[in-house]
Image: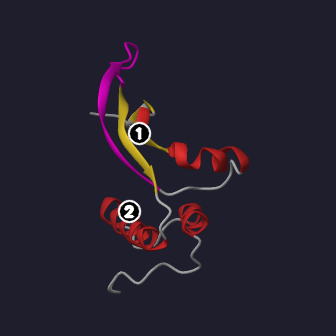
Amino acid sequence: MAGPAHLSGRLPDGDANGLAAIARSLIDDPRRIHVVVALIDTAKITQTCDDGARVATVRIRRVEAISDPADRTRLQTLLRREYERRTGQTVLPFDLEEDVRSAFGDADPPDPDAVP
């Protein structure tokens, strides 16, 4: 029986690291939540001898900060849909809802049936 997943990771080098574009904001406003898209895979798997837990070290292949308002709206819709698919819950928990509002700046979720 597998336990909960544990992850570790690091940022890519060079222009695969799109977070450099928001580095100043990350420093000046560390509590601000940013919207990013990342491509990841597994760099290695480590197993703990005591309990057999396996930890995947995530390799971030590419990460981009999303600033375009139209793209952010699409990503908000995708985030909500994927959360619903993964958990079966149609309503986000309060803390996640607050994070989404903070990140996307929307008082209400976008209409998933709206044509972009």
Residue 12 x %, y %? 41, 33
Q: Quadrant of the N terminus?
A: top left
Crowd tier of the residue under label 1, counting other residues whose Cα lies within 10 Å: few below 14, some 14–19, many 20 or above: few
Q: Which residue is mark 2?
A: 83
- Residue at 42% of width from left, 33% of height from top? 14
Which quarter of the figure has residue 95?
bottom right
For badge 1, the amino acid type reads Asp
Tag count: 2
In the rendered structure, the answer to whether residue 12 lies left or right of residue 96 reads left
Marker disc for residue 60: none
- Extreme residue toward the bottom, this view: 114
In the image, which residues are magenta?
Answer: 36-54
Q: Amino acid at mark 2?
A: Tyr
- The percent coordinates of residue 55 (x first, y second) are 37, 27
For the stretch drawn in magenta, the main secondary structure is strand
Q: Which residue is mark 1?
A: 15
Q: Name, please, the residue furthest toward the right.
A: 28
